[in-house]
Amino acid sequence: MSSNPPTQFEQHELLHKELLSNFIVHSCINCDDFNEANETCSQVNQRPPAKIVVFGCPKWTPSIPF
């Protein structure tokens, strides 16, 4: 029985999610001010540009898990 190893894309996605969940990478995805339901930032009441979503912003605050 053999299983295929993860593709490069799958490895990248897993690594990125791990970095986000450990707050190593600061992004809208792991910011307390990001509303995932409508994908907006509560600091500015609008959807952040792609660069901000990926790289974060100076107002980034960690999501509190409770």
Image (cartoon, rainbow, N blue to C red):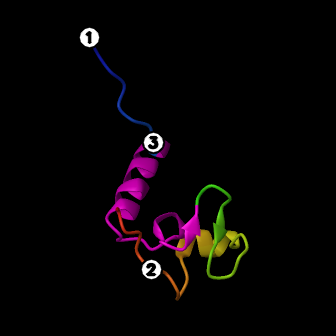
Q: Residue furthest left?
A: 1
**Quadrant in which the C terminus appears:** bottom left
Mark 1 → mark 3, Cα distance in angstroms: 21 Å
Q: Is residue 25 magenta?
A: yes
Q: CA distance from mark 1 to mark 2?
A: 46 Å
- Looking at this view, is 10 or 17 the one in front? 17
Q: Tag 1's secondary structure? A: loop
Q: Nearer the viewer, residue 59 or 64?
A: 64
Of the residues under marks 2 and 3, which one precedes in the sequence?
A: 3
In the rendered image, which quarter is residue 53 located in? bottom right
Which amino acid, by three-letter code, is at mark 1?
Answer: Met
Is residue 14 rendered to the left or right of residue 56?
left
Q: Earlier in the sequence, mark 1 or mark 2?
A: 1
| Residue type at numbered disc 3 | Glu
Residue 28, placed above or below residue 61:
above
> x, y (%) of residue 50?
67, 69
Task: Give the secondary structure at mark 2.
Answer: loop
* Residue mark closest to the camera, 2 vs 3: 2
Residue assigned mark 3:
10
The residue singled out by tag 2 in the image is 61
Q: Nearer the viewer, mark 1 or mark 2?
A: 2
Residue 45's tag is: none
Q: CB atoms at circles 1 and 3 under 8 Å apart? A: no
Percent coordinates x, y for residue 52 in the rendering = 62, 75
Q: Quadrant of the N terminus?
A: top left
Residue 42, quarter of the rendered image: bottom right
Which residue is pictured at 35% across the width and 62% down the height? 65
Which residue is labeled 1 in the image?
1
Residues rendered magenta in the picture? 9-35
Q: In the rendered image of this protein, does residue 60 appear above or below residue 54?
A: below
Identify the residue at image location x=35%, y=71%.
Answer: 24
* Outermost front residue: 66
